[in-house]
Amino acid sequence: MKLSTRELATLAVFGALWGLVEASLGSVLKSLNIPLSGVFLAAIGLIIALVGRVFVPKRGSTLFIGVLATLIKLFSLGGVIIGPMVGILTEAILAEIVLSLAGKPRRPALVLAGALGVAWVMLQPFVTGPLLFGRTAFVVWLDLLDRGSQLLGLDVTAAIWIVLALLAIHLAIGGLAGWFSWDIARLLQARQGRSIPQTLES
Amino acid sequence: MATHSLSQSISQPRPAPRLGMLGYLAIFAASLAAVMAVPPRVLPWSAGLCLLVAALVYPSAFRRLMRLRWLVMIALLALPAVFFVGEVDRSLAGIPVSSEGLQTGFQIVVRIVVVLIAVDGLTSSVDIASVAGLLEKAGLHGLGFSIGVALNLLPSLQQSALNAWRSLWMRGGLRKRRWRSLTFLSVTIVSNALSRAEEIALAAEARAFSPQRARRLPVVTGRFDPLVLVVSLIAIVVAIMIV
């Protein structure tokens, strides 16, 4: 991946923005204990990363933004939180895979990348819980069902429906993030007076 | 005399630090492996060893762990296991708990403490430029430049976001057409940041900077890095192989 000075500076802007959002808004949302705060944080982060991809439509640019955001989060004053760092990096990798397979950035690809990236928020505790914090997958599963039943008002016995509904919510919010990132990218391109690429005019 | 000692001190190479980027990374990886891969019966020993190494290498990490937020987080992660895992078979200060739950809770606490100290120790011992340098060596060319631009942008980004928010607030804030206002707010912030980044890129290009020809960021190496690397690798293999 060869990037010009201008492209590197552009990626730095989006990486800094994602890192800043995670370090500032992330700490506030976590301390307020708002439900689905991780989902909204991931959605905002992915909007930034996807807009960045539209600005620098090269393979690896989304991952680059993710690495920058992770480093900023790692060295932020908020302290050590390994979960968000794993989250940022994995979301960036998932979005990068989707966008690399799709070729040029288009709205459907951004929607899919956003949906998969936000869906990871739901799956992450199953990976980081047992690996980093010694929690069993069963405890994580119970925790997920408990939170789902509280959020949706369903009985814990309807496990499948809770999981499906939660997954649908995650995918929908991620998809919306991808959808809006396309519009925001267009608006930004127009504001910047840059020529809108052909892929954006569709 | 003074000139002589000055020239002598200039000519003497600065001694390498005891541990460099690779050494700290190796200790971090070994600590993670020591608490993640070992079976529960060995966990207290491996965690004790990790904490001993941490106390020797970065003792200040323990002080930072004593913050209320971390203690609350550890308690929140460990307490559910104490009460909800296993059959209740004993009482602790009048509270019915299970031995299995206590054991699981203890394991969770030990793992979190080691992981938090390992990450905190790594981040406080290694600077961001060294990490960027290492990632550049791994193939992410230009990361050092981008990190520099990003860090340079952070204060101006915060100021620009504050200015844009104040402007929006003076025009009525988010009372009407909230989504539109928020969109314009974010577009203004990003637009300002992109303009600033373009100025930085132009300045770099004017100085003939090219990411392909730029000098790579130095990775700090320590005297004991090879030794620590070998010991850590052995520790990781042992941790994986213990059944």
Image (spheres, rainbow, N blue to C red):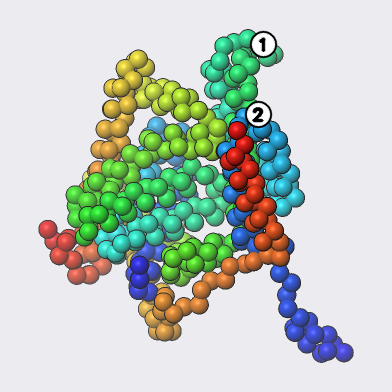
**Image quarter of residue A50:** bottom left
- Chain to which mark 2 belongs: B
> Mark 1 — residue?
B91
Density class for disc 1 (Cα within 10 Å; few <14, some 14-19, many ≥20) is: few
Q: Identify the element where label 1 is drawn.
A: strand
Q: Quadrant of the C terminus of chain B?
A: top right
When the figure is inspected, residue B241 is found, relative to residue B131, above or below; the finding is above
- Residue at image coords 71%, 61%: B224
Can you say whether B124 is above or below A121 in the image? below
Q: Are marks 1 and 2 in contact (CB under 8 Å)?
A: no
Residue B231 rendering spot, x and y as whole percentages = 68, 52
| Amino acid carrying mark 1 in the image | Ser
Residue sitting at x 38%, y 44%: A41
The residue that appears at 26% across and 60% down in the rendered structure is A54
Spot occupied by residue B77 in the image (x, y as percentages of width and height)? 55, 30
| Residue position for label 2 | B41
A43 sits left or right of B37 in the view: left
When asked about the image quadrant of residue B198, the answer is bottom left
In depth, the one of A177 and B226 nearer the eye is: B226
Q: Secondary structure at mark 2?
A: loop
* Front position among marks 1 and 2: 2
Q: Do discs 1 and 2 belong to a common subunit?
A: yes
At horizontal 71% and vertical 41% (from top left) the residue drawn is B49
Position of residue A36 measured from the top left corner of the image (x, y, whole percent): 38, 34
Q: Is residue A79 left or right of residue A194?
A: right
Q: Nearer the viewer, residue B7 or B236?
A: B236
Q: Is residue B2 above or below residue A201?
A: below
